Image: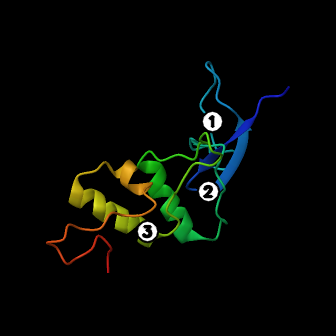
Amino acid sequence: MPHGKTSFVCLPCRASYKQPYPGRYDHDRVCPRCAEPLIHVGSAFAAPKRRDSSAWRTLSVLLHAGVRFHKSCCGGPGYRPRTLREVRERMNYAQTTGEPIAQALVLRELPQRPSGSSASYRSN
């Protein structure tokens, strides 16, 4: 039975590649277009269209924060923000509460602010 494949991404080229899982003695993967290092994003990753610059910026923030797209026991990777607005809201929440950015970015719903405060975590 052949080994499964997983996704690697080149952010400068806005390209995704399916390759065999990294092995114990595997080499670093490089982009065939620009020779920059590829980022291992996981097997549950679906790449945005190359021309969708907003989606690629959102993806870049997620990857630089350490968020990946690995399958969980229930199938998918769980919630991931899809827009820059959702990313900004979660970054604002992380800054306000002190929660690690990687954890705040994968929250499906942001908790409400304490009752003494009228502002929300959402950016205007």
Secondary structure, mark 2, is loop
Amino acid type, mark 3: Glu
Residue under label 3, please give it: 86
Left or right side of 51 for 5: right
**Residue count near mark 2 (Cα–Cα under 10 Å), binned few <14, some 14–19, many ≥20:** few
Residue 70 drawn above or below residue 119: above
Amino acid type, mark 2: Cys
- Spatial CA distance of label 3 from label 1 is 30 Å
* Image spot of residue 122 (x, y percent): 33, 73
Amino acid type, mark 1: Arg
Quadrant housing residue 114: bottom left
Q: Assess whether mark 2 and mark 3 are in contact (beta carbons under 8 angstroms).
A: no
On residue 29, which mark appears?
A: 1
- Spatial CA distance of label 2 from label 1 is 14 Å
Residue under label 2, please give it: 13
* Image spot of residue 98 (x, y percent): 23, 52
Residue 6 drawn above or below residue 118: above
**In the orientation shown, which residue stands out farthest toward the front?**
115
**In the orientation shown, which residue stands out farthest toward the left?**
116
